[in-house]
Image (cartoon, coloured by chain):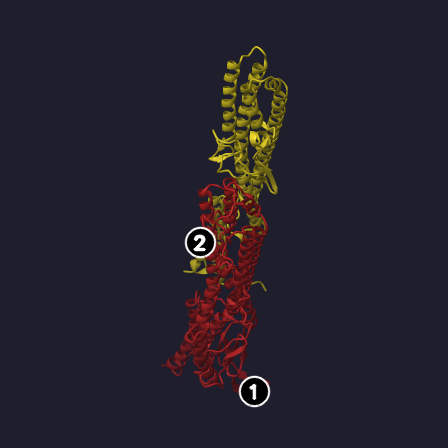
């Protein structure tokens, strides 16, 4: 037979457990808007029963009498598979948005189609030659031609310089992120610290939910930069491979190793930046193609302008193209007569020729690739959003749910208190009223 | 099991929708204010390159128009000068017939010869006509007058051709070789106009029977032959002016067409864009209103 006070203990456990569950609910509500927070759940479990010995019940056997409730664990509700998917998509998004930003700058450098773009300036250059052909004797027309040509070459040089800057900026950003005090280094050192704290807590049998949330959040951010893979090495301490090298390793004294050289295709934002900075990357490829346009212009005009080169023959790239001709040396005709315009006429005929066509093809290519990047980014963004929605659906805090839980646990607390009151009244009956027969 | 909807989810979704709505509105606003549906190549890569090609084409057509205008001016100047020469030659012919008759005495013949000398100079003066500071009849030596007034009758220009581009790959010569008409004077004995006129004056002054015969016979024939050459040249100039006129109207037709194509490719359709803008604006304010309601309401509002 149990003690008269047994029921009080059962009620007390109920009270304490419901109170703790309310504390967990309160924690959830407080973090309803915290980024990266996973909702927590108090797992309730009946406590070990009181064993009544044989002959305790009517049929002569023993029995087990329930002794109340306790909290088995405070669990973090999270789906690791969604984390994996999320991180894979974060990587694509990091790649796509770095590309979009960069190609956006490239498009800005070309400023097409406007009246100030290179296409319009080429058109004005051919116009100027036609004007010279119409008035070969006129020094004014020749001087206008030289000025127009100088503006054109200046534009070539500006665009070329801007493309170089775009590639250089990608290089600089890569260096800043991967530097000794960059984002990667900071995140790696924080992850190593979290690994130690989590490992210690798990070793002592606790589940450090909030530390784990923090660690997952950092891994999410890391996954935007490059390919990340995670392996549990025991006690919930993670080894993290980043862009093909081991970044965080709990078995090493420091817990992480950085700086390191990433593999050739780290993926993510760093992969995109490395690609954008490379000589084979979009910005420098466009610059090479712009060089080809400049070289074609220099070659085709100089081939007709035979007296002295119109453009400096040494400058056959967009960065070096230079007008050599002056108002005095502009050649209008093949002979000496002042009214001859066959050369000017022939150069004016180059309008809509290979130079213009090469340039238009270049603009179309940039447009196509920039559009593909924009679309890639929006696709990656919507995939990330949809996985994040599913993650939030599992791990996020629903205030309605928490309110319901709050009522549930509050009622549970009230009921436990009522049980305790009942026990108290029973004891009062026993202590103050019993044995007073005839008094 | 249906999807759990959590607080952060609905606020994230609201924020995302608002952002999308706002970026669509901004894009339409940009199209409306610029009037262009292509503001950068990535808006429509094919359209952008086509717009560039069409703009180039249009620029070329404008330039060809200007070339045609310049060529027409040049040919009109030539035609006026040749017309004047034609008038002069008509007067010469009148004087020649008058001087060739027996009734004309030596003094009146000398007077006629003086007038013919003046008329010869005025022919040379017409040949020296300029267009925009350039001698139109000197071939490509446009800074040199073809004949020196009051000097020798030798042609000073060259045989070069001046052309104007009036279309892609189409060039038309605009100058006229006046040497085939005027020649190099008496010294060259080429029977051209100046040679003939100088001979007529000499015959009028000569007074011999042979001179009188020449006046009535060969001189008249030679003058008529030169008149034929002049008429041929004028017809040629007229034909070229016509060609330029035709080219001008064709170019303006092409320019109109290219402008329309460019506008189709590049310009925003205002009616459509404004409609889209209004629709997006309504959608955006609806999203704002819904967001305000969704984000605020929870079970919390109904518990006391």
Residues marked 1 and 2, same chain: no
A103 vs A181: above or below: above
- Which mark identifies residue B88? none
Q: Secondary structure at mark 2?
A: helix
Between the residue at mark 1 and the residue at mark 2, the CA separation in whole angstroms equals 62 Å
Residue B131 in the image, given as x and y percentages of width and height? 49, 33
B225 vs A149: above or below: above
Chain given the colour red: A
- Which mark identifies residue A62? 1
For the residue pair B96 and A386, the one nearer the viewer reads as B96
B2 vs A330: above or below: below
Chain of the residue that carries numbered disc 1 in the rendered image: A
Q: Secondary structure at mark 1?
A: loop
Asked if one can make out residue B198 in the rendered structure from this viewpoint, the answer is yes
Residue A373 in the image, given as x and y percentages of width and height? 55, 59
For the residue pair A173 and A93, the one nearer the viewer reads as A173
For the residue pair A43 and A417, the one nearer the viewer reads as A43
Q: Disc 1 vs disc 2: which is toward the camera? A: 2
Residue B146 in the image, given as x and y percentages of width and height? 52, 34
For the residue pair B184 and B76, the one nearer the viewer reads as B184
Q: Residue furthest top?
A: B103
B172 vs A253: above or below: above
The residue to which callout 2 is attached is B292
Check the rendered structure and report the hue given to chain B.
yellow
Residue A431 in the image, given as x and y percentages of width and height? 38, 82
The image quadrant where one finds the C terminus of chain B is bottom left
């Amino acid at each position: 037979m149990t003690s008269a006070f047994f029921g009080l203990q059962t009620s007390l456990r109920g009270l304490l457990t419901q109170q703790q569950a309310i504390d967990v609910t309160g924690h959830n509500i407080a973090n309803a808007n915290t980024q990266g927070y996973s909702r927590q759940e108090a797992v309730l479990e009946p406590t070990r029963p009181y064993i009544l010995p044989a002959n305790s019940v009517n049929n002569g056997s023993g029995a087990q009498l329930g002794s109340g409730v306790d909290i088995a664990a405070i669990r973090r509700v999270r789906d690791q598979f969604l984390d994996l998917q999320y991180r894979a998509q974060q990587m694509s998004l990091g790649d796509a948005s770095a590309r979009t930003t960069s190609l956006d700058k490239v498009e800005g450098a070309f400023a097409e189609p406007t009246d100030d773009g290179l296409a319009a300036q080429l058109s004005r250059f051919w116009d100027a030659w036609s004007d010279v052909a119409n008035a070969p004797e006129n020094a004014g027309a020749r001087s206008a031609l030289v000025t127009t040509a100088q503006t054109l070459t200046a534009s070539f040089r500006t665009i070329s310089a801007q493309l170089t800057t775009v590639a250089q900026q990608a290089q600089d950003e890569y260096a800043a992120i991967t530097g000794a005090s960059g984002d990667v280094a900071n995140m790696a050192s924080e992850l190593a610290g979290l690994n130690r704290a989590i490992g210690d807590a798990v070793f002592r049998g606790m589940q450090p939910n909030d530390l784990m949330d923090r660690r997952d959040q950092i891994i999410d951010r890391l996954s935007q930069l490059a390919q990340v893979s995670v392996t549990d090495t025991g006690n919930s301490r993670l080894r993290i491979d980043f862009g093909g090298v081991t970044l965080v390793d709990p078995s090493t004294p420091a817990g992480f190793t950085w700086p390191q050289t990433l593999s050739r295709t780290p993926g993510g934002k760093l992969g995109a930046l490395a690609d954008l900075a490379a000589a084979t990357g979009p910005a420098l490829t466009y610059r090479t193609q712009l060089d080809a346009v400049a070289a074609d212009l220099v070659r085709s005009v100089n081939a007709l302008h035979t007296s002295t080169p119109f453009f400096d023959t040494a400058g056959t790239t967009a960065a070096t193209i230079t007008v050599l001709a002056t108002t005095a040396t502009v050649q209008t005709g093949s002979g000496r007569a002042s009214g001859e315009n066959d050369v000017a006429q022939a150069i004016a005929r180059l309008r809509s020729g290979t130079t213009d066509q090469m340039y238009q093809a270049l603009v179309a290519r940039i447009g196509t690739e920039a559009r593909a990047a924009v679309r890639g980014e929006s696709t990656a963004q919507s995939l990330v959003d949809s996985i994040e929605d599913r993650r939030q659906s599992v791990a996020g805090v629903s205030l309605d749910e928490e309110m319901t839980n709050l009522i549930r646990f509050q009622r549970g607390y009230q009921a436990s208190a009522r049980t305790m009151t009942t026990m108290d009244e029973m004891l009062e009956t026993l202590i103050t009223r019993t044995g007073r027969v005839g008094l | 099991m249906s999807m759990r909807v959590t607080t952060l989810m609905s606020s994230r979704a609201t924020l995302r929708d608002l952002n999308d709505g706002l970026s669509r509105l901004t894009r339409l606003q940009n199209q409306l204010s610029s009037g262009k549906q292509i503001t950068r190549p990535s808006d429509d890569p094919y359209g952008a390159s086509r717009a560039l090609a069409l703009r180039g084409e249009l620029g070329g057509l404008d330039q060809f128009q200007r070339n045609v205008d310049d060529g027409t001016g040049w040919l009109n100047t030539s035609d006026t000068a040749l017309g004047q020469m034609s008038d002069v030659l008509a007067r010469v012919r009148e004087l020649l017939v008058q001087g060739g008759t027996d009734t004309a005495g030596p003094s009146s013949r000398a007077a006629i010869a003086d007038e013919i000398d003046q008329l010869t100079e005025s022919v040379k003066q017409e040949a020296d006509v300029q267009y925009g500071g350039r001698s139109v009849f000197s071939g490509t030596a446009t800074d040199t007058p073809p004949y020196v007034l009051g000097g020798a009758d030798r042609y000073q220009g060259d045989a070069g051709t001046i052309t104007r581009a009036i279309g892609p790959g189409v060039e038309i010569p605009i100058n006229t070789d006046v040497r085939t008409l005027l020649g190099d004077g008496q010294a060259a004995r080429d029977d051209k106009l100046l040679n003939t006129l100088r001979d007529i004056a000499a015959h009028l002054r000569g007074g011999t029977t042979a001179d009188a015969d020449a006046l009535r016979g060969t001189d008249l024939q030679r003058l008529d032959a030169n008149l034929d050459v002049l008429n041929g040249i004028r017809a040629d100039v007229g034909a070229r002016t016509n060609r330029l006129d035709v080219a001008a109207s064709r170019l303006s037709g092409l320019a109109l067409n290219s402008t329309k194509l460019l506008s189709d490719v590049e310009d925003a359709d205002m009616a459509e864009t404004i409609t889209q803008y209004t629709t997006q604006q309504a959608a955006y304010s609806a999203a704002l209103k819904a967001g305000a309601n969704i984000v605020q309401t929870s079970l919390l509002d109904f518990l006391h």
